[in-house]
Image: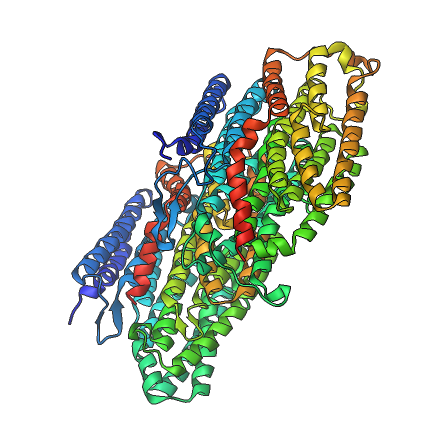
Amino acid sequence: MNLIPAYPELWLLVMAPVVLIADLFVRDQRRDATYALALVVLAGCAFWTLVTGHLTGMQRTETFNRMFVADTIGHVLKMFCYVAVGASLVYSRAYLVERGLYRGEYFALALFSTLGMMVMISANHFVALYLGLELMSLSLYALVALNRDSAASTEAAMKYFVLGALASGLLLYGMSMIYGATGTLYIGDVARAIGANQPDRIILLFGLVFAVSGMAFKLGVVPFHMWIPDVYQGAPVSVTLIIGSASKLAAFAMVVRMLVNGTLGFDAGDHISDLSRTLAFNWQYMLVILAVLSMAIGNLAAIAQSNIKRMLAYSTISHMGFVLLGLLSGVVGNVLSAANAYSAALFYVIVYALMSLGAFGMILLLSRAGFEAERLDDFKGLNSRSPWFAFVMMLLMFSLAGIPPTVGFYAKVVVLQPVLEAGQVWLAVVAVLFSLIGAFYYIRIVKLMYFDEPQDTHRIETRADMRVLLSLNGVAMLALGILPQSLMQLCLLSIQGL
Amino acid sequence: MTSSAPWLSLAIWIPIVAGCIVLATGDRHSRESRWIALAGAAIGFLVTLPLVAGFDPNTSAMQFVEPARTWIARFNVKYHVGVDGISVLFVLLNSFITVLVVAAAWESVQNKVAQYLAAFLIMSGLLNGTFAALDGVLFYVFFEATLIPMYLVIGVWGGPNRVYAAVKFFLYTLLGSLLMLLAFLYLYMKSGGSFSIQDWHNVPIGRGEHFWNDPQILLFLALFAAFSVKVPMWPVHTWLPDAHVEAPTGGSVVLAAILLKLGGYGFIRFSLPILPGASHDLAGFMIALSLVAIVYIGLVALVQTDMKKLIAYSSISHMGFVTLGTFLFNPLALEGALVQMISHGFVSAALFLCVGVLYDRMHSRNIADYGGVVNVMPRFAALMMLFAMANCGLPATSGFVGEFMVIMGSMKINFWLAFLAATTLVFGAAYTLWMYKRVVFGAIGNDHVGALRDAGMRELVVLGALAAAVLWMGVHPAPFTDIMHASVDNLLKHVAAKP
């Protein structure tokens, strides 16, 4: 059996228990060793991903009875997942120490959830996809509840678990219907079966509705968004960081695998069957509804929030609506302009993950023992306390609002372009109007930082590693905004390699 | 025509780099920050001089064009800059005003000096980029990025109601520019994947039967949303008085002198040549809005009690001439619109600086708090007199030239049009001179006025430079209009020829 495509997963599968076991032999004061080991494991994942990419020549390679696939989009998304999880560990070290969460289980669970994401990203089979999803979700449920003494965390975990289980059920039900109609669980074969066997469209459509609902839950788009604000607020910020960045990348991969690889059979080239095309129009229409609702409710509800975690939660919802804009404009009339549209969505989701990493990182920066910087007012007068980090946060906020010269602007441009290309002018206008409303609450943060006097006058004390990484994260918004070409190209290559 | 050095890129990037250096000096070294900022602004201005010295007025082609460098290959976006007779003067005006703004802030700004000066330097570079950009995305990025420093300038150093003004400014402008972005993406699609503004000029845009399915009209309205807010045209002007009143002096100066010009420039650079059909169809609408701005806003200015608000309304009224001249489609009026923009850049900057001089001493902008300033500040009063006269369009000042050209241009179209436009000469004189009388003339109003000291050397130099510009342009406008001729003629020919 060819194990090369799965090198990173195998490495992580071996090393995550090693981290857990090694931690048993580490005294509490020396916990930094576990922390370092976890980061090394993630760096190793990145290394093995590069090796895999090199050995497979960046070609699409299947293994484990074709249940598992290594391709460019997989490598790219996995790399950004490592970055997101690694950065969340670095950002949250002081936070975890101060809250007594700096334990071996935390790192092991974070690594296991990463493994789940990797399996999701690389799945070529419904069961593999589902297993990856559950591994990720279960680890995240446990992480949310890790702060046992906090009622809010427990409530958030409960809510996340119950609704997550429901969503998994919906997804599984959808998968089973698609299986019933096409007779295959292999993602790539579904499209071929649709083309060859002409299965009953109603059953397929029924399955698609359930599958889209399940995926919409994982992405957190309206009307499947209820859990997002509560979980974001209730979970320890360090965990919110993972849910808000890395898990979105994995959820995006799931959507691409299911809808694009699965029902459209994008790898089949231009030979898209009529039924696949009809189905694509159907699911694109579902996504239109989800996208418009998400942009509307996400942006409007965010304005009313006084808690920054909740505000960012609603902002996530609206951004996921924008990601859907890219996904829903791939198949237009008889033209397949998919590479353009899907690479735009991929670009958006990666950029969003980086932005949300930075924004939650800032919350961690301002938090300290016994104090959670989670009210908007805690950002007041940051420019007087630390001009540099106020600048970093300003870059992040303008990027989230989509103002040039930050990279958030290009994210908006690349998704709006295929929407217009698809002739959906009204949708583009709606998106633009809601992003205007969105700009209001982002510039309100800038207002608090720059125009107001500080309420909290504690000195900002952080370790150097966090200081450097967070600065890099913020400056990356500007750097990628000035030179977005390489990331755009990478996204295009990823989609073309599907 | 080839140039030896990339003057335009220098004009864009020198202020931005200088701004970053100033930012790095931090708040503890305000003396050093000021000198570095002044040096940066001065060098930024000096590098724009070759643009005029080497400008060839006989061609309408883009000059000082730097070889287009691929910037975002994925979308065929290029870093491509150049100027023609329409844009070159704005680059110069902007760099000139920046020097004055930095100098004017020398003593009056004491809080977070480095950040204040850096904001203006960076904004100056971005504005130069907006005027010089030949690529749609490049234009948009510069256009939009200017919002960030201006938002901070109003919000951090502004008056008591600054937060409201800053947010209103930001959201108003953003709404317009987002719709413009959609228009740009549509043009990108129609032009077969090009963001070059010059390519867009030659893209045929179809017409529809009704306005709601006529691509030209819809594109025009999208661009109109962006530019009319910037100009600002009635009825989307309400952000301007708020922003002006709350902004610090430098903010008001740059806002009035440069930022507003982006709107007029946008109409001339984008709306007219890309959408001539829609421009013709909607010219009546644009002219009507312009006349409302000229007449109605002129009347509104009469009743203001706050000096800055009065000048703000006067700006809107004057910018009405710009949009009026733009949509008359004759060379005289269009050149008049351009001259009016440059002139208004000098005059409004000077008036806001005058108010700044008074405000620094009295901490009041209320007309009622003043009276008899001439008795204690004779030199200042003389200079302000000149600017007040220029604002009402007195012959031999720059204010006269543009307004006269536009009125003459509208006379060719329709007498009543010219008549309505000419009422500004009456209203403008009324509100400006009445304000001047109440503030400067008469007996000394109160003890605070009695204790005022006259303008110092620095203030006199700043205002004197503007006075020289106002007089030069008023007495001898030929060098300014010569630069514009070829480009304006070519533009109108293009508009007439393209469907």
Image quadrant in which the N terminus of chain B is located: top left
Number of numbered callouts drawn? 0
- Residue B15 in view: yes
- Residue A233 in view: no
Where is A377 relative to B481, above or below?
below
Image quadrant in which the C terminus of chain B is located: bottom right
Identity of the residue drawn at 28% across and 53% down: A42
Residue A482 as seen in the image, left or right of residue B350:
left
Q: Quadrant of residue A432?
A: bottom right
Q: Position of residue A177 (x, y in %)?
A: 41, 84
Where is A370 relative to A421, above or below?
above
Residue A350 as seen in the image, left or right of residue B368:
left
Q: Position of residue B70 (x, y in %)?
A: 34, 47
Identity of the residue drawn at 51% across and 32% down: B483
Q: Position of residue B61 (x, y in %)?
A: 44, 41
Q: Quadrant of residue B332?
A: top right
Query: Outermost residue toward the front?
Result: B412
Where is B154 relative to A413, above or below?
above
Decide which of A210, B9 is in the foreground and name it. B9
Which colour scheme appears in the figure? Answer: rainbow
Decide which of B461, A94 is in the foreground and name it. B461
Decide which of B435, B91 is in the foreground and name it. B91
Q: Position of residue B374 (x, y in %)?
A: 76, 13
Where is A440 relative to B46, above or below?
below
